Amino acid sequence: MRLGYDTGYFSLNSQTARMKGFVDELSFLISKKTGLELEFVYASSDILIDLLERNEIDSIFWDMNKNIVNQSRYLFSEPVLYNGYYLVTQKNDERNLSGLSAKRVLILNNEMATLFIAKYPSVDFNFYEDDKDAFVKLSQSMCSAALVPVESFRTFESEFYVQKKPINDQFFYFISGHESKNGGKVKDCIDTLYKSGTIEEMKKRWNLDPA
């Protein structure tokens, strides 16, 4: 069984280190429950999606808003981890997106960016390559705000102001192709672990509860 993980989510900081520990433990639990030998594949999301669609890996662990993609192309497990996007500004700046007209706001170039740009046309959106780069530019006043996932801002939240509510809801899932026999087993295993409460217990143990 080949499971794919985006290397960008496992950079060295306290939050992603906890997430990697959680994911590694969960992966080996999937292997144990399914009886399948485990192989990790680390790459960027674009490469992983390509491998998935070519049926070269069984499943990927990825944060995706499944309501804006063609769900008929993929099998989604139950949601595993919450990763909603939050607006982060300077410590003394509590403006929301509506109050940032003509101001530069950094956003990750993904499927969500198009929705934000369309909804807030007066905001000067610019793309960032990785979360650390977004926080560096924010600290240097090269932008007014940044939209970042919850797993990233927790590392820096003491330095900036974080809006109380997420801009959107987004979750990590195990996502498989319909043609993958093992991918279906991964989905079923995650669904069972979710319903039994095992995943919630693991999230609390690894301090990954959204609260």
Image (cartoon, rainbow, N blue to C red):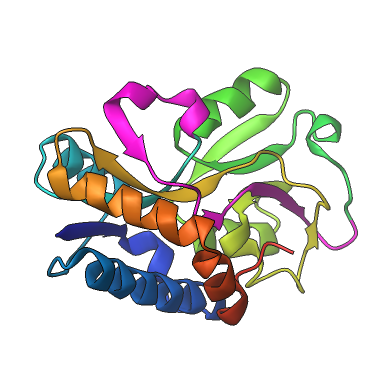
Q: Foreground residue, 97 or 105?
A: 97
Please name the residue shown 58% across and 66% down the image. Answer: 200
Residue 44: percent from left, percent from top = 28, 52
Please name the residue shown 15% across and 59% down the image. Answer: 2
Per the rendered image, the range of residues in magenta is 66-92
Residue 183: percent from left, percent from top = 22, 47
Please name the residue shown 38% across and 61% down the image. Answer: 8
Please name the residue shown 71% across and 56% down the image. Answer: 141
Per the image, is 12 magenta?
no
Q: Is residue 13 visible?
A: yes
Side (left or right) of 152 relative to 11: right
Residue 142: percent from left, percent from top = 65, 52
The correct choice, above or below, for 159 with respect to 164 in the image is below
Q: How many marks?
A: 0
The correct choice, above or below, for 156 with respect to 109 in the image is below
The correct choice, above or below, for 116 with respect to 173 in the image is above
Q: Foreground residue, 22 or 125?
A: 22
Per the image, is 69 magenta?
yes
Q: Is residue 136 visible?
A: no
Side (left or right) of 168 relative to 5: right
Side (left or right) of 128 relative to 135: left
Which quadrant: the C terminus? bottom right
Q: Foreground residue, 149 or 22?
A: 22
Q: Foreground residue, 97 or 136?
A: 97
Residue 144: percent from left, percent from top = 74, 47
Side (left or right) of 37 relative to 15: left
The quarter holding residue 117 reads top right
Which quadrant: the N terminus? bottom left
